[in-house]
Image (cartoon, grey):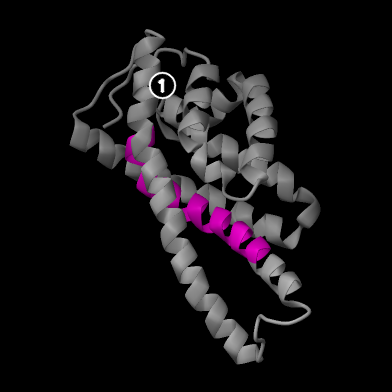
């Protein structure tokens, strides 16, 4: 649990430093001092944008960085549940987790763009991304390929809907989502159902 949380905190700290530099550059370009009667409104707006951008960038890159540690955490939960799955060597498992998280970007980036242009769909898309980010860990130990993931999604539909709604609201709270990342991985691993036909326990390589 400590490793993915450490990745999230370091990412938040690094992004905060970069945001401070960007904010100063934008304020200087617009001639805004950040002091005076409207300073509180400017700072509030800046923090709001910071929270939104933190989520967008973390779900695109931070989840990839944290994926090996999240996958190890998921495997620990699956062992405790006595699921049957192949346990690859540490380095190979880490590379597979990074590849899976990188491939997931092909789904998430179009969804993020869609939520930007169609605000009414923002939260449902946000909740769907939260589901994909977390349930893909237990699913990846059950079945191969995109079609296999779709099958798992249909099988676990009630669980994914409940998870997406509850953790979607939690992740919508600025910065909280980064801090509860390990708990959300555990929750998804506990809620996903075992069983994916004759492909269960396959070698992910």
Highlighted range, magenta: 47-70
The reply, left or right, for residue 31 in relation to residue 198 is right
Q: Is any atom of residue 83 visible in this view?
A: no
Q: Nearer the viewer, residue 45 or 91?
A: 45
* Residue 202 rendering spot, x and y as whole percentages: 32, 20
The reply, left or right, for residue 117 in relation to residue 98 is right
Q: Residue furthest right?
A: 120
* Residue 138 rendering spot, x and y as whole percentages: 44, 25
- Give the structural element (helix, strand or loop) at label 1: loop
The reply, left or right, for residue 148 in relation to residue 86 is right
Q: Which of 12 and 203 is in front in this view?
A: 12
Q: Mark 1 points at which residue?
A: 142
Report the magenta stretch's main SS: helix
For the N terminus, the quadrant is top left
Q: Is residue 88 magenta?
A: no
Q: Residue furthest front?
A: 36
**Residue 129 in the image: above or below residue 162:** below
Q: Is residue 52 magenta?
A: yes
Q: Which residue lies furthest to the top in this view?
A: 82
């Amino acid at each position: 649990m400590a490793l993915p949380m450490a990745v999230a905190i370091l990412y938040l700290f690094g992004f905060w430093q970069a945001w401070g530099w960007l904010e100063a550059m934008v304020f200087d370009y617009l001639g805004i001092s950040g002091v005076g009667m409207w300073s509180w409104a400017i700072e509030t707006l800046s923090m709001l944008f910071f929270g939104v951008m933190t989520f967008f960038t973390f779900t695109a890159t931070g989840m990839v960085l944290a994926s090996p540690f999240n996958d190890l955490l998921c495997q620990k939960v699956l062992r405790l549940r006595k699921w049957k799955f192949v346990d690859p060597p540490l380095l190979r498992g880490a590379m597979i987790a990074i590849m899976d998280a990188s491939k997931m970007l092909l789904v998430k980036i179009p969804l993020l763009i869609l939520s930007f242009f169609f605000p009414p769909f923002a939260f449902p898309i946000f909740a769907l991304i939260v589901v994909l980010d977390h349930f893909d860990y237990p699913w990846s130990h059950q079945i191969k390929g995109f079609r296999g993931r779709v099958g798992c999604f249909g099988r676990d539909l009630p669980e994914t809907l409940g998870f997406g709604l509850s953790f979607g609201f939690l992740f919508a709270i600025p910065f909280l989502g980064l801090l509860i990342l390990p708990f959300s991985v555990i929750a998804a691993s506990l809620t996903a159902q075992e069983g994916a036909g004759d492909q269960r326990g396959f070698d992910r390589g």
